Amino acid sequence: MTDQPVGRTAGQTHATAYDEATRDRLAADAAAIAARYPQQRSALLPLLHLVQAEDGYVSPRGITFAAETLGLTTAEVSAVATFYTQYKRHPNGTYTVGVCTTALCAIMGGDAIWEELVEHLGIGNDQTTDDGAITLERVECNAACDYAPVVMVNWEFFDNQTPDSAVALTDDLRAGKPVKPSRGANTVVTFKDMSRVLAGFSDGRADEGGDAGAATLAGLQVAHENGWTAAPYGDEGTK
Ligand code: FES
């Protein structure tokens, strides 16, 4: 299912640079990313996603590449890469399965889903299954509370999950079966492919399933039925 190495072990060595062809390809992509910003260093976040699209994590050679490309030190790049959980410090699985265990999802079943997946997959937070298919993560609120409890696969939504449905989802992913998110894009792509999208290179799926769902619109519908409107901005409303 995957050609990614799984995890890092003590003493494991890393490639310290890209070969010439790879570096040229990445340099062209990096130039396209940097051109979107008035200051080159502002391109660091998407550039780190580009590194993950290549290596499956923010690799030592990727940190060096980003630093050299943007005129930063490797310490500055590392400081940013280690701040955000979306940047992986060791090779990620093909699919990041994120279980929301923030308060609302937790009480709606997120905690039970988490415990079931830990048991079923035999791994803990930020760990990867032996086949390299799944990296399991506890994730914070995805602003999808109206569909709690939510599980995300490479940042695609799987709404109203149960422990059983989450187990079935991970089984399908490990078996290489296609899975369909509850909303948004119709498919789930690999971690590397999604990382390239996050770097700013469209894969053509952004406009799939763009409508808001019934749960999201429920409050608006109640407001319409009762003739409620938002308070005006200014003297009579909230400043
Ligand atoms: S608490 Fe889970 S999406 Fe908000």
Image: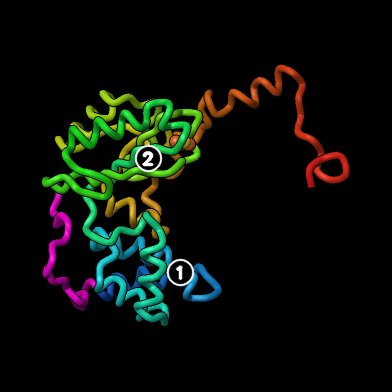
Q: Amino acid at mark 1?
A: Ala
The residue labelled by disc 1 is 43
Residue 105, quarter of picture: top left
**CA neighbours of label 2 inside 10 A, class few (<14), some (14 to 19), many (20+):** many
Which secondary structure class fits the magenta region best? Answer: loop
Q: Earlier in the sequence, mark 2 or mark 1?
A: 1
Q: Secondary structure at mark 1?
A: helix
Q: Residue 52 placed where, x, y %?
A: 29, 61
Query: Is the C-beta separation of discs 2 and 1 under 8 Å?
Result: no
Q: Nearer the viewer, residue 189 or 101?
A: 101
Three-letter amino acid code at the position of disc 2: Glu
Residue 16 image offset from top left, x and y in percent? 20, 76
Residue toward you, 200 or 145: 145
- Looking at the rendering, the stretch of residues picked out in magenta corresponds to 1-22
Task: Kindly identify the residue that appears in the image at 26 percent across and 75 percent down.
Answer: 23
Asked which quadrant contains residue 189, the reply is: top left
**Which quadrant: the N terminus?**
top left
- Where does the image place residue 27, in percent across and percent down from the top left? 33, 74
In the rendering, which numbered label is found on residue 156?
Answer: 2
Measuring 24% from the left and 30% from the top, which residue is drawn there?
116
Specify whether residue 147 is painted magenta: no
Query: Residue at horizontal 16%, vertical 39%?
Result: 122
